[in-house]
Amino acid sequence: MKDIEIRKMTEADLPEAMALKEVEGWNQTEDDWRFYLEHNPEHCLVASRGGQVLGTVTAANYCSRVAWIGMMLVNRSARRQGISSCLMREVIESLKDCDSIKLDATPAGRQVYRSLGFLDEFEIVRMGSQNTPPGLPESLKAGVISRIQESDISEIFALDSQAIGVDRPELIRYLLSNHPGENLCVRRDGKIYGFALLRKGTRFNHVGPVVCRHSEDALAMILELRKIREGAMIVDLLADKTFLHEKLLEAGFIIQRSFTRMYLERNPRPGEPVILQAITGPELG
């Protein structure tokens, strides 16, 4: 690639990174980019030419056990020059000590990542809503929904780790800080059985992760968040959660797009997808 430099991202690159994601209609805020940089400075890269940022990639490295690659963006005028492949090789090399490397691929990206050795794990469906849906059906039996308190955090950490297969305390605290006092949990007999977090975006509010064993609980929390927070909302559901899909469609959500969760060659820490109702987002896992 003539005159292309691959280097670590700096805060000075954020305006150009934001411009790239705006062209693609993505939802990340500048605070999100700062979070990536603060916690994973070794794994946030840019491709530049003549001082102009032409591409980006980030990775969230969770304790060198599981890493998620995301924010792969290339300026439309600079595509088909090998920039994304070069960024991918560099970020994978930076994660060579991780037990497992994962990403959530678009249908177009999936074929590219398969050629690099990534294998399918499961499918994800993005659903969105523009309007506040009706209340819960009377027949729906869910646990008692309440706001997450500071005293609940250790249980939230444990449930997230169980679902994902690795501890992510910094991420969970960051997500909780996005809409403090509006994140929800399901509590029965004094114990937390599930939670749903909500974060800001430049285009819509994003629900996730949603972790609980029963889809009825997940539905109750998602619809409660929809009532609490005005504006467009999205949630990235695991495709096998068919009850949740059907009920959200009935509540006015629509299917927007799909992703495939993939892992590079091996998957020693799959977590428990059975209790993962919705992911955090394709850039964070």
Image: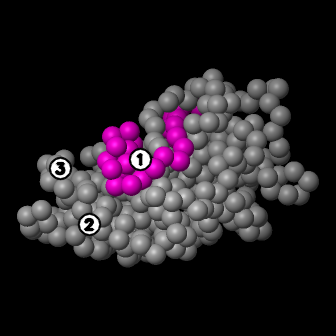
Q: Position of residue 53 (x, y in %)?
A: 20, 63
In the depicted structure, whether residue 21 falls above or below residue 10: above
Residue 105 - label: 1
From the image, tell me which residue sits under label 2. 46
From the image, tell me which residue sits under label 3. 79
Dots 2, 3 in contact, CB < 8 A: no
The disc, 2 or 3, on the residue closer to the chain's N-terminal end is: 2
Q: Residue at x 33, y 50 (%)?
A: 115
- The foreground one among 186 and 227 is 186
The residues tagged by marks 2 and 3 sit, at their Cα atoms, a distance apart of: 14 Å
Residue type at the position of mark 3 = Arg
- Left or right: 187 with respect to 62? right
Q: Is residue 220 visible?
A: no
Residue 236 - label: none
Q: Position of residue 74 (x, y in %)?
A: 24, 53
- Left or right: 19 with respect to 251? left
Residue type at the position of mark 2 = Val
Please rate how many residues cluster around mark 2, counting C-alpha atoms within 10 Å: few if below 14, some from 14 to 19, many from 20.
many
Residue 57 belongs to magenta span:
no
The disc, 2 or 1, on the residue closer to the chain's N-terminal end is: 2
Residue type at the position of mark 1 = Ala
Q: Residue at x 17, y 66 (%)?
A: 48
**Residues rendered magenta in the picture:** 106-132
